[in-house]
């Protein structure tokens, strides 16, 4: 088509005009882009720079070393052990199968772990180290290090793991650690970032749990640069954390070990208190379990076995178990009555072998009765009728008050799991909990430590300590935290008439040192270490009139679960009390027969600071004791030979 | 105006044509590509392979091709316009049936010696064809409804095929490039007003259709729009790329973090860092100064094209140059708007800087056409 020059000029004019419009729009857009760049790169630069840093910098936590736990002599009872593990980096390994085959030739590896590690390696990025085997011996590690050139991608790492050198002997006190679980996280209110570390070890039970805060320490941090896939490019800086604080307990691990050994075979609890400062020298519960099993991750079989055992090895009976205190409660009743002034020391009560209270007959343990009996004799021979009588005079509320004063029915603040409160019942308690009125029969039952009364071995030991000193002795388990002495447990005076205390102590002395005392067979013959005590036998069943008529069945003939609990509380030496203790043998039968000998052995061990000379025992039992000492000495674990390190 | 009407006496011949090339544009193209080489070297972690070296080879090849195209008289290219356009339509059809699927889209055709993206080629041939059309069409008929409908159909045909691949970015570029040539040629304002009004209505319809059986866009395209509108509501999924891109860009600051010091690109937080998102690496490492310099270089290329177009009395040459300049402008403007978070991520590379063969060769051929128009200007 032929164009005229006029056409050409006209079209060029239009194009020019339109081009200016388009150019204007383009300039506008470029201006907008320029402004946008300015806004992002100049005005918001800091904000974006921060985001970029957040992208590339990861903060990794460095777990601190957990504080150690020592006994009173500086012997470690919870230690950190170097633990070697082998890790593998998939991308460095090349042929994984070949490398693993070589590795299994060098060290023994559980095939299950191997499969699990293989799976994990496939699942995770190729540069993430995966643990192949844990808890290797130093020899294994040395072998691996020697063969490094033929094991690409394999390296040995060292970490710390908890170990309990005393094994089962301190299991219930120290407890154990284990990996933090979702359940733990939901239960505890703690924003410590350490808890977010997978498999971070925290205290699960016992002191490990209750003293967690001091033992854990605080996290260190390591700033690393990562790429978008999470691969670590380099470490930027590192700040070490604060290691956990070391803790020294008041326990004497050697004594503790002895007590555990002595209780072996029974289902029992025993507590030894130092009367100078309330220090708990031993808190034993038998049978026990090895806490090291839990640190490594307990097997299903072991776990089931522990739970199925009718002796309940997992229960810390010394502090968690509560039992009717039986006759060991008679001191409480007597002291309440004397302090209230409702009975004079030399006043006698007639014991025909039973007491009738509103048509209900309460029996004395001695069928024929004790005849006329006063306070001193009633404790020594453990007459029940005497207490039925004076309890009715003084009333339950005063008895409960005295019980609490002596440390029963109150919760002692100790860093242990599930410390039991026990029960010192009174009228208000029954109204509130049972919604029933208190009856005289309840008082009569309570007077000899039956009925509603419940106490733990720990509480009975405290009671004994308070009677021995007349002071408000408070049990203390932690001696030093990070070298700082914790307050002493030797409390203020209880404000009990000294005369009352003296009479009670004298009666307790006769329980084990007078020919007619219930624990005479378990006396200590060393003059400077005379032991005062009180036996207790508490029923776990009601004796029916038919049974009574047919003659009471002997404990030995009953099934274990229905036998009486055997109890014994004591302090020694009588003239200058140094230790108080309690022993409770579950379903052990009579207190004088089952509990008192154990208490005597423990007391001697504590007083002599080791195996006592046979002269401290009555001559008749020395051969038997010598044999027993040999047996126990062989049983005490090698951990006790460790040197003090505090 | 046919070539016979040129006053050929003043048209340079032979190697003398080299002297008449628009050298400023060539220099600017080399400068921009230089930026590209630097960035490709940097994102490869300081290595010429795998991206910088092939890119340089292709650039050298493209430069030779450009000068070859520039040597050929512009009237030859005008006469070839219809053939070229027809050829690219056929290639687009071929892609529909025989194309290679790559990253979810069917865009490539294997020619044996190279893999070609016909949609890239179409960007230039469409402009060529429209320029030739308006050169042929008498002025009086430009706004006649029939003569307006015809080029609209020529634009919509490749747009529809490209959308079907699916390649939203290229389709938009084709549409806007074609429309610009029509606008420049003098089509009446009212048409554009109507179309823009209609476009707004269509966008409304697109959003209204979402989730209904007659949904107009693919789900991924809707998600891209959502992500664009608020990338923060899916920071790990759809919004991850654009969020990381903005972080890279913004963290550059005034002068950048230094060559090869960009943490976002070096540590792989950036997506597609050697192709569509290469601008963010540049902005991160060279900062506002570097990014703005590149923007100015682009602006200068467009400006030199506009100047040569407006001083060219040949209607075809003038429309072609302006159309190519517009296409080039759309390329970088959409890419930059995309990575700065001003526009949805539609997959448009940064011209001459992003790694990629087809786009670079096609662009350099296009600038060859611009040079040819410049050299063979009626004087």
Image (spheres, coloured by chain):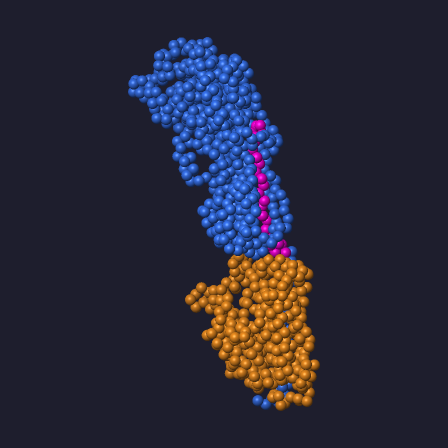
Chain colours: A blue, B orange
Q: Front-most of A495 and A397?
A: A495
Up-down relation of residue A294 to residue B237 (above or below): above
Q: Residue at x 37, y 27 (%)?
A: A561
Q: Along the horizontal axis of the image, is A511 left or right of A61?
A: left
Question: Is B259 positioned to the left or the right of B153 in the image?
Answer: right
Q: Is residue A154 visible?
A: yes
Q: Is residue A282 left or right of residue A485?
A: left
Q: Position of residue A254 (x, y in %)?
A: 53, 26
Q: What residue sits 57% from the left and 23% below the top?
A: A277
- For the point 63% across and 63% down, the residue is B47
Residue A196 point in image, percent of width and height: 53, 45
| Front-lying residue, A583 or B347 | A583
**B166 to A630, vertically: above or below:** below
Is residue B193 in sight in this rendering? no
Q: Is residue A399 above or below residue B321?
A: above
Which portion, as a residue range, is magenta? A49-75
Name the spot of residue A7 as percent of width and height, x first.
61, 87
Magenta span contains residue A65: yes
Q: Quadrant of residue A434?
A: top left
Q: Quadrant of the C terminus of chain A?
A: top right
Pinpoint residue A142: horizontal percent, then vertical percent: 56, 44
Answer whether residue A595 is magenta in the image.
Answer: no
Q: Nearer the viewer, residue A218 or A359?
A: A218
The N terminus of chain A, quarter of image: bottom right
Residue B354's place in the image compared with A602, above or below, is below
Which quadrant of the figure has residue A441?
Answer: top left
Q: Is residue B257 left or right of residue A348?
A: right
């Amino acid at each position: 088509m032929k164009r005229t020059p006029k056409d050409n000029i006209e079209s060029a004019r239009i194009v020019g005009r339109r081009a200016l419009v388009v150019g204007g729009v383009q300039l506008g857009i470029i201006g907008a882009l320029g402004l946008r760049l300015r806004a992002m790169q100049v005005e918001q630069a800091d904000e974006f720079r921060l985001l970029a840093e957040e992208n590339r910098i990861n903060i990794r936590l460095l777990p601190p070393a957990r504080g150690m736990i020592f006994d009173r002599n500086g012997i470690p009872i919870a230690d950190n052990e170097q633990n070697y593990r082998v890790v593998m980096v998939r991308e460095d390994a090349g042929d994984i199968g070949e490398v693993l085959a070589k590795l299994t030739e060098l060290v023994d590896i559980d095939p299950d772990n191997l499969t699990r590690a293989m799976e994990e390696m496939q699942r995770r990025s190729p540069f993430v180290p995966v643990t192949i085997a844990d808890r290797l011996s130093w020899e294994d590690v040395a072998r691996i290090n020697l063969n490094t050139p033929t094991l690409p991608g394999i390296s040995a790492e060292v970490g710390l793991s908890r170990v309990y050198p005393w094994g089962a002997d301190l299991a219930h006190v120290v407890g154990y650690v284990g990996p933090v679980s979702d359940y733990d996280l939901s239960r505890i209110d703690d924003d410590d970032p350490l808890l977010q570390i997978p498999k971070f070890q925290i205290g699960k039970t016992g002191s490990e749990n209750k003293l967690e805060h001091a033992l854990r320490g605080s996290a260190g941090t390591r700033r690393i640069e990562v790429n978008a896939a999470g691969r670590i490019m380099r470490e930027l800086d590192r700040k070490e954390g604060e290691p956990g604080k070391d803790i020294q307990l008041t326990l004497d691990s050697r004594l503790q070990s002895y007590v555990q050994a002595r209780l072996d075979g029974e289902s029992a609890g025993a507590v030894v208190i130092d009367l100078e400062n309330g220090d708990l020298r031993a808190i034993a519960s038998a049978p026990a379990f090895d806490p090291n099993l839990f640190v490594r991750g307990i097997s299903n079989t072991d776990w089931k076995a522990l739970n199925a055992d009718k002796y309940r090895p997992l229960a810390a009976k010394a502090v968690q178990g509560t039992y009717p205190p039986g006759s060991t409660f008679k001191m409480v009743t007597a002291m309440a009555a004397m302090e209230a002034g409702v009975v004079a020391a030399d006043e006698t009560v007639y014991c025909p072998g039973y007491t009738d209270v509103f048509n209900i007959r309460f029996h004395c343990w001695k069928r024929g009765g004790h005849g006329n009996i006063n306070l001193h004799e009633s404790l020594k021979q453990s007459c029940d009728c005497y207490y039925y009588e004076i309890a009715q005079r003084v009333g339950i509320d005063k008895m409960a008050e005295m019980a609490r004063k002596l440390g029963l029915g109150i919760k002692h603040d100790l860093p242990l799991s599930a410390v039991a409160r026990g029960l010192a019942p009174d009228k208000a308690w029954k109204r509130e909990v049972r919604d029933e009125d208190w009856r005289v029969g309840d008082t009569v039952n309570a007077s000899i430590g039956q009925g509603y009364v419940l106490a733990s071995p720990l509480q009975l030991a405290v009671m004994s300590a308070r009677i021995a000193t007349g002071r408000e002795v408070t049990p203390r388990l932690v001696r030093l935290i990070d070298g700082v002495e914790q307050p002493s447990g030797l409390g203020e005076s209880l404000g009990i008439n000294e005369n009352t205390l003296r009479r009670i102590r004298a009666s307790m002395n006769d329980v084990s040192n007078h020919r007619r005392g219930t624990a005479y067979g378990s006396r200590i013959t060393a003059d400077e270490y005379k032991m005062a005590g009180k036996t207790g036998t508490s029923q776990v069943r009601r004796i029916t009139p038919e049974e009574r008529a047919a003659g009471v069945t002997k404990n030995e003939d009953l099934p274990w679960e229905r036998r009486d609990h055997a109890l014994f509380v004591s302090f020694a030496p009588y003239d200058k009390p140094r230790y108080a203790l309690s022993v409770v043998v579950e379903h052990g039968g009579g207190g004088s027969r089952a509990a008192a000998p154990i208490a005597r052995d423990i007391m001697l061990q504590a007083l002599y600071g080791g195996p006592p000379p046979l002269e401290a025992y009555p001559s008749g039992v020395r051969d038997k004791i010598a044999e027993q000492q040999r047996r126990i000495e062989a049983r005490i674990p090698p951990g006790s030979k460790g040197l003090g390190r505090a | 105006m046919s070539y016979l009407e040129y006053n050929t006496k003043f048209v340079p011949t032979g190697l003398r044509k080299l002297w008449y090339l628009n050298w400023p544009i060539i220099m600017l193209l080399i400068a921009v590509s230089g930026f590209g080489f630097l960035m490709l070297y940097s994102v490869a972690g300081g290595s010429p392979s795998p991206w910088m070296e092939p890119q340089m080879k292709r650039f050298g090849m493209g430069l030779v091709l450009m000068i070859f195209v520039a040597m050929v008289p512009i009237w030859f290219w005008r006469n070839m316009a219809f053939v070229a356009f027809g050829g690219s339509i056929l290639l687009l059809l071929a892609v529909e049936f025989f194309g290679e699927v790559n990253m979810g889209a069917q865009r490539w055709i294997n020619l044996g010696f190279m893999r070609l993206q016909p949609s890239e080629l179409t960007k230039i041939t469409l402009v060529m064809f429209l320029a030739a059309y308006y050169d042929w069409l008498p002025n009086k008929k430009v706004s006649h409804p029939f003569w307006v409908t015809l080029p609209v159909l020529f634009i919509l045909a490749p747009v529809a095929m490209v959308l079907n691949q699916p390649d939203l970015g290229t389709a938009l570029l084709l549409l806007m490039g074609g429309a610009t040539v029509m606008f420049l040629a003098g089509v009446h304002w009212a048409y554009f007003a109507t179309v823009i009004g209609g476009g707004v209505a269509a966008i409304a319809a697109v959003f209204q259709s979402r989730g209904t059986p007659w949904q107009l866009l693919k789900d991924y395209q809707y998600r891209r729009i959502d992500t664009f509108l608020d990338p923060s509501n899916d920071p790990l999924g759809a919004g991850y790329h654009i969020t990381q891109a903005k972080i890279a860009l913004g963290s550059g600051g005034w002068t950048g973090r230094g060559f090869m010091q960009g943490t976002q690109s070096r540590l792989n937080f950036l997506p597609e860092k050697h192709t569509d998102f290469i601008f963010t690496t540049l902005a991160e490492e060279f900062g506002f100064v570097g990014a703005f310099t590149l923007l100015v270089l682009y602006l200068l290329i467009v400006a030199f094209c506009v100047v040569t177009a407006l001083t060219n009395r040949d209607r075809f040459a003038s429309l072609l140059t302006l159309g190519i300049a517009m296409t080039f402008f759309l390329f970088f403007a959409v890419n930059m708007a995309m990575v700065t978070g001003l526009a949805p991520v539609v997959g448009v590379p940064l011209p001459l800087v992003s790694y990629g063969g087809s786009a670079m060769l096609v662009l350099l051929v296009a600038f060859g056409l611009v040079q040819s128009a410049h050299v063979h200007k009626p004087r």
